Image: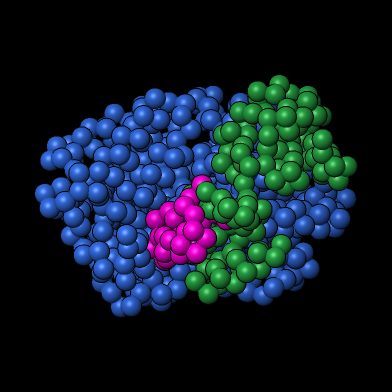
Chain colours: A blue, B green
Amino acid sequence: MSGSGLILAGVDGDRTWALQDYVARGGYSALRKVISEKIAPETIIAELKASSLRGRGGAGFPTGLKWSFMPRSFPGAKYLACNSDEGEPGTFKDRDILRYNPHTVIEGMTIAAYAMGCERGYNYIHGEIFEVYERFEAALAEARSAGLLGQNILGSDFSFELFAHHGYGAYICGEETALLESIEGKKGQPRFKPPFPASYGLYGKPTTINNTETFASVPFILNMGGEGFLNLGKPNNGGTKLFSVSGHVNRPGNYEVAMGTPFAELLEMAGGMRAGRKLKAVIPGGSSAPVLPGSVMMDCTMDYDSISKAGSMLGSGAVIVMDETTCMVKALERLSYFYFEESCGQCTPCREGTGWLYRVVHRIENGLGRKEDLDLLNSVTGNIMGRTICALGDAASMPVQSFVKHFGSEFEYHIENKKCLVPPEVQYEGSQIYVRP
Amino acid sequence: MLSQESLQQIDREIAKYPPDQKQSAVMAALRIAQVEKGWLPKELIEFVASYLGMPAIAAYEVASFYNMYDLEPVGRHKITVCTNLPCALSGGVHAADYLKKKLGIDFNETTPDGKFTLKEGECMGACGDAPVLLVNNHHMCSWMTTEKIDQILAELEDK
C-alpha cells in the first residue's frame, strides 16, 4: 500500500484506523463545518458536481448528479447504502480503505445523509473480509460515542444511524439492487430497473448507493472545494483514484494517484514487471473490463476517458498485469469459470450463456476446440449482452470478446495444435497459472 | 438449539434494522449459528427462521445462495484458497496444489481424520496479498508461501 494521495495519505501505521488518529489527520473537520455552519444540502451537492467525482465502484456515474436524484423532501424513511461488497477480481481497494481509514467512509456517509435527508444507512461489507467488518464495527462504535454518529450529531438536530451489514459470499451482491435485496434478508438477485433505487430502494424507500471509495472522497472534496479536487486530476476525471495493481508486477498493492497519471508511471510505482519480463496484456478496470494489449496500455493514462478511448473501462481501478509467459486461453478460462459460478441464475441468457462460454473456452484450453468455436463464442456473447436484468451478463461477455479480439491467434493455435503457444514449463515458472499434472 | 451467547449476538444484529424488518438479520443469524454448530443442518436453518419470524424456505434460500454457508458437514478447519485469475498470477493455483498434496485431498473433500476441508474460493477482494487463504470463513491469511502454509497447518492441527 502506498501512503500518498488523499484517502491513503498518512495511513501507514498500526492505529491509523482509530478515531484519535483520524482526527489528528484533520478528520471530521468537514462534517463539523457542515453542521456548525448549517451548510445547505444544495451547496454540498453543487461542490460534488464541481469536483467531477465519478462513482469509484466501476460504473463511473457522476456522484453529484446521483445525489441530486434523491427526493429530499419526500416524507418518510430514506436510506443510504455503501457498497463495500468488493469481489470484482483484481479489486482490493475498499478493503484497505476500511481497515486503514474507516472513519473517512463514516464521515463521507454522514455528510451524504445530511445532504440527502437520509435517517439510516448500511455499509454492506464483502463476506470474505470478516476481520475488516469487525474493525468497521469498532470504528462505528467510536464515532457513536464521540457524538459524530447517531441521534443529534454534534448537538444539532441532525440524526443519522449507520450500521454494518456483512455479506457471505456472492459476487452479485456488488450489483446495487442485489445488494439491497441482500440487506432485506433475501437471495441477492438484482431487481429490474426502473424503478431506480432513488425512488424505490431499500424496503421500497428512496435509497442512494455509492461505493466505499466514493464516500471516502467526500470529506476531502468539502475541505479543498470541488474545484480543488477536480484540479488534482483532469477535466471530467476529477481527483485521485486508488488503483489496485495485481498480477505480474514486483510490488502488487494499492496506489492512490491523480487521475490522468500515465499507466507507465503506475507500473513503475508497482515495482515494474516481475523478473523483468515483457508486458503482454493488461485488464485495466477489474476482470469485467476488456483486456488490452500491453503496447496499447503503455500509451494510456489512468482515467475514465483515456481507457475508454483505448477500448476498455477504468471500472473499479483494478489493474491486472500479465507478462509474456501468460497463456491467454488459460487466463480467460479462469475468468469465464468465475462468471459461470457467480451468475445468480435469474436470467436465462446469463445463467445458460455463462456456462456455454466457460465450457467452450475450457475445451479449447484442453485441446478439444473446434474451428467454429471462436464464432460460437462471439455468437453466445451477442446473445447475452443487453438481454439480462443486470450487468453481470455483459461483464461475463466483455472479457471473452476482447481476449478473442486481441489474442485470437493464440486461440487459433490452441485449436489447431491442441496445446498452448506458451510452453507449459514456461507458464509454470512464469505466469504461475499452470500446475504440473 | 443455540447457546444464550449466540442468541444475544443475533439480537444485536436484529437491532440494526427497522423493527418490522427482522428478516434483514437472517444472513448474520445464519453465520452466528454456523460458527456455533460448524455447519447448517436443515433443523438449524428452520430454528433461525422461526426465531426471526420468517418462512423456513426463505431462510433456506439464503443459506443455499451465499457460498460461505455450509449445508453439509465440514472438517474442523475449512480452508478456502482463492484461485481466481489475479491470485493465480501470483501463486494462488500453486498454493492450492501444494495444499491438495500436503493434505492428500482434492477440493470439496475432508481429510479422513476430520480435521481439514479444502475449498476453492472466488475473489476475496485481497488480490494484492496473493496467495490468500481463508480459514474457517473469518480469518484471512496473506502471502501464503509453502513455508507459511506449513506453519498454519501445524498451528491448526492442535486446535
Q: Is residue A176 left or right of residue A236?
A: right
Residue plotted at (88% across, 42% down) = B4
* Residue A186 showing in the rendered view: no
Q: Quadrant of the N terminus of chain A?
A: bottom right
Q: Quadrant of the C terminus of chain A?
A: bottom left
Eyeballing the image, is A294 above or below B39? below
Residue A207, image x and y in percent?
A: 63, 34
Residue plotted at (61% across, 28% down) = B61
Residue plotted at (62% across, 37% down) = B71
Residue A403, image x and y in percent?
A: 25, 50
Quarter of the image for residue B42 reads top right
Residue A15, image x and y in percent?
A: 72, 71
Eyeballing the image, is A180 above or below A247? above
Residue plotted at (34% across, 73% down) = A273
Outermost front residue = B112
Q: Nearer the viewer, residue B111 or B25?
A: B111
Q: Is residue A117 left or right of residue A262?
A: right
Magenta region: B79-108
Q: Is residue B82 magenta?
A: yes
Q: Is residue A6 magenta?
A: no
Quarter of the image for residue A41 reads top right
Residue B157, image x and y in percent?
A: 65, 64
